[in-house]
Amino acid sequence: MSFKIIASQCTQCGACEFECPSDAIEFKGESYVIERDKCTECEGAFDTQQCASVCPVPKTCVPA
């Protein structure tokens, strides 16, 4: 499984991109997206998903 970013809620702050340990987040078009094949849900690296923990808008980075 992976996480996804709800584009309509994303403020494009970029915090998630720099915190992602698997380099799965990038800015495409007008919003940030999480590449499913790269997302590891931070398993083995952190206890919580870093994208969700740094996002200023609750429930923007969610399980896909």
Image (cartoon, helix red, strand yellow):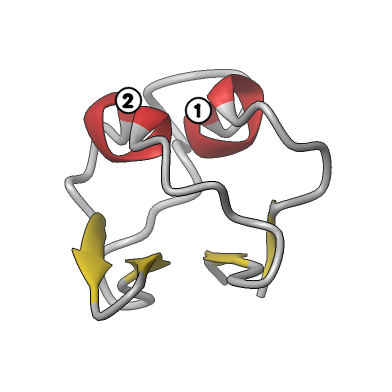
Q: Are marks 1 and 2 in contact (CB under 8 Å)?
A: yes
- Vertical order, 23 against 2 (above or below): above
Q: Quadrant of the C terminus?
A: bottom right
In the image, what residue type sits under mark 1? Gln
Taking depth in this image into account, of 7 and 54 the one nearest to the observer is: 7
Q: How many circles with numbers are drawn on the protein?
A: 2
Taking depth in this image into account, of 24 and 45 the one nearest to the observer is: 24
In the displayed structure, does residue 4 sit left or right of residue 26?
A: right
**Which dot marks residue 10?**
none
Q: At 82% across and 37% down in the image, what residue appears?
A: 58
For residue 5, which quarter of the picture? bottom right
- Where residue 22 appears, as percent x and y from the top left, is 22, 44
Taking depth in this image into account, of 62 and 43 the one nearest to the observer is: 62
- Vertical order, 21 against 53 (above or below): below
- How far, Cα to Cα, is label 1 from label 2? 6 Å
CA neighbours of label 2 inside 10 A, class few (<14), some (14 to 19), many (20+): some
Q: At 44% across and 37% down in the image, what residue appears?
A: 42
- Where residue 21 appears, as percent x and y from the top left, is 25, 32
In the displayed structure, does residue 48 sit left or right of residue 23?
A: right
- Where residue 46 appears, as percent x and y from the top left, is 48, 19
Q: What residue is pinned by disc 2?
A: 19
Q: Quadrant of the N terminus?
A: bottom right
Taking depth in this image into account, of 63 and 9 the one nearest to the observer is: 9
- Vertical order, 4 against 48 (above or below): below
Q: What residue is pinned by disc 1?
A: 50
For residue 20, which quarter of the picture? top left
User: N-terminal of the two: label 1 or label 2?
Assistant: 2
* SS at badge 1: helix
